[in-house]
Amino acid sequence: MLRPIAIDRENPKAALKHVAKKGDELLKDNVWVLIFPEGTRVPFGTIGKFSRGGTALAVNAELPVLPIAHNAGKFWPKSGWAKKQGVITVIIGAPMYAEGSGPRAIANLNDRVQAWNEQMQREMGSLPPAPQAPVSNDQVAV
């Protein structure tokens, strides 16, 4: 009923083309497409590399990305099926639009979505605070 897009993880290039084709068909049928850009669950407290498949789909369809962050990994770890009791936090961001079209727009949008997700993970306490840049002597106010 959800019309999932099955991919072959052994062949990433073919998977990306398949997501683009099937995703475009679904969007044209007014079906929302949910993409997990990391491709799989990652250990709690980490962020995986974001694939550009979802942002490419959005840019090519001239649609925004609706970013969503959650901390479900805190209660359902990547390894094993055991779940812990707790409350999952879900944050839905503002729609993010590409600035232009083509590969640069896809990469830029993907970077912005990943940065937003990382910031939300930090705010939820799923990641440690961002490291502070060192302050040089000429930047210190007296």
Image (cartoon, grey):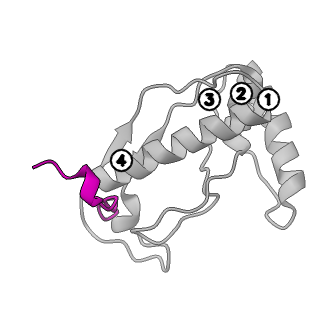
Query: In percent of the image, x 66 and y 26: which residue is there?
Result: 31
Whether pointer 2 and pointer 4 mark residues with C-beta atoms closer than 8 Å, the reply is no
Location of residue 39 with respect to 102 vertically, above or below: below
Where does label 2 land, which residue?
59
The residue tagged 1 is 102
Q: CA distance from mark 2 to mark 3?
A: 15 Å
Please state the horizontal and vertical placement of residue 56, each as a whole percent of the image. Answer: 74, 36
Q: Residue at x 27, y 53 (%)?
A: 138
Q: Position of residue 129 (x, y in %)?
A: 29, 60
Question: What is the three-letter code of the residue carrying label 3?
Answer: Trp
Q: Earlier in the sequence, mark 4 or mark 1?
A: 1
Quickly name the residue at label 4: 120
Q: Is disc 2 in contact with disc 1, using a CB cutoff of under 8 Å?
A: yes
Circles 1 and 3, Cβ within 8 Å, touching? The answer is no
Reading the chain from its start, which is encountered first: label 4 or label 3? Answer: 3
Q: Identify the image quadrant of the N terminus.
A: top right
Q: Residue at x 9, y 49 (%)?
A: 142
Q: Indicate the secondary structure of the residue bearing disc 3.
A: loop
Q: Which residue is mark 3?
A: 32
Q: Is residue 130 magenta?
A: yes
Which is more foreground, mark 1 or mark 3?
A: 1
Is there CB contact under 8 Å for labels 4 and 1? no
- Label 4 vs label 1: CA separation? 27 Å
Left or right: 85 in relation to 41: left
